[in-house]
Image (tube, rainbow, N blue to C red):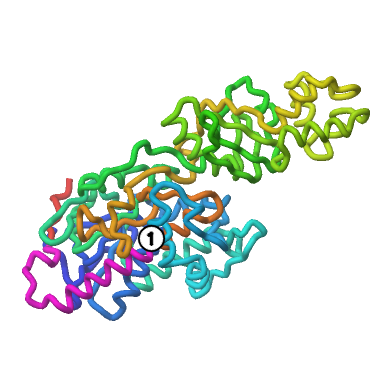
Amino acid sequence: MGATARRSDGGAVTPAEGTGRAPGLACDILVIGAGAAGLFAATWAGRAAAGRPCSIMVVDGARTLGAKILVAGGGRCNVTHVAVSEADFAGSSPAAIRKVLGRFPAADTIAFFAAAGVELKREETGKLFPVTDSARTVLDALLREARAAGARLIHPARVTALSRSGGGFTATTAGGLIQARRAILCTGGKSLPKSGSDGGGYALAEALGHSITQPLLPSLVPLVLPEEHWIRSLAGLTLPTRLTLRAAARRLHATRGSTLCTHVGLSGPAVLDMSRHWLMALHHDAAARLEIAWLPDMSAEDVDRLLVSAQGRGTVSSLREHLPERLVRTLCEVAGAPPAGDLPRDARRRLAALVAATPLPVVGDRGFTVAEATAGGVPLAEVRLDAMESRACPGLHLAGEVLDVDGRIGGFNFQWAWASGFVAGRAAAGQIVAETDGNQAAPADTRPASVVAPPAG
């Protein structure tokens, strides 16, 4: 194949979208990854450069774009939350997270989607979903806005290597090479690898001078209990609980919310929110322990007083006003407490302690194949937050889950994608426009050179 064709504005002429071929292409901005952060970065890059010569390409290794968006929120896509702050996230420093979130708050997300024809509705929890209850509505809007902003989408075209080339970057794909003046890395983490988020972006970042936090762990992931544990016999039971993580005498973290007992252990919002904290604590301290309170607003003393006041009515009768009978009978069995009749003091205290703080001997998690997010990634300390630009490799921007930021359940990880993608996209385009306006006599290698694709076969 010959040299890359150029448009009159200096941008590259791209092949048809969806072909997966990238033979000898060149562009001003290359966005690697067409998930939430990538599509948002491309959109805002195009808008920031509106009317100016700035070509934008988005490449993704997936045959079908947006798989992770389509499965989010049970297929409804929890776009964001009505109240978002740095306290809803873990990973890099709260101050750094707050600075990025402040550039594109939840109100801006709501306005963006409204302008894109996607009306959002607020649920009691503060979560915001499209009124259609369909993630497809969200994905279609993102693709539409990216294309309207001038971005060209190429897939499947997995980037297997990214290197410095002259004044820009060279990306290697199975279909050929792509050269770009700037690159935005939006490859995601390791969660839901079938969606294309398989951790490959970390190697690209490392090759350009970045470090990756260790360990990389699943976040928002169900937890596994021993095969013989009695909680597994309660599969299907859902109720509000409180989970507490402790190490020695210290309380490290606590979560509240709905918990689902499963055939392998525990899931539900409270458990998913706790998972990354538990796994991280266990990595650093084998003595870390996790416990669950079945009555989240009651201490062991409160439960004991409840049982004392209900003497004569029977244990099951007194507790089933607060808990499912199926759980009450199991708790009585485990504690050795009679479900009816008199309740001896020692049995009562054992039962009260179990209700208030059941130890959870977690033996594992469901892994990245099920996890909704990744704990770990490129530290924000290695990024200039005003542009999401690499300190190690100027010209490289990063956004989304590839960074060491993960939020709790409720639309927070999407809000991080929107905010970081917004900053990265606008900054990258702003630099291209500034360089073009003030660099008429710039050296030739500051523009992407034509690339000849390797011979077929």
Q: Residue at x 60, y 45 (%)?
A: 269
Q: Quadrant of residue 335?
A: top right
Main SS of the magenta part reads helix
Q: What element does badge 1 sit on?
A: helix
Q: Residue at x 47, y 42 (%)?
A: 219
Total marks shown come to 1
Residue 388 coordinates in the image, percent (x, y): 31, 60
Front position in the image: 278 or 228: 278
Note whether 101 is above or below 195 in the view shown: below
Most distant residue in the bottom direction: 51
Badge 1 crowding class, 10 Å Cα cut-off, few under 14, some 14 to 19, many 20 or more, is many
| Image quarter of the N terminus | bottom left
Q: To which residue does mark 1 refer?
A: 420
| Image quarter of the C terminus | top left
Q: Is residue 294 left or right of residue 173?
A: right
- In the image, the segment drawn in magenta is 422-450
Q: Is residue 445 left or right of residue 79?
A: left
Q: Residue at x 57, y 25 (%)?
A: 361
Front position in the image: 150 or 216: 216
Does the stretch in magenta take in 379?
no
Q: Amino acid at mark 1?
A: Ser
Q: Quadrant of residue 183?
A: bottom left
Residue 300 coordinates in the image, percent (x, y): 72, 32
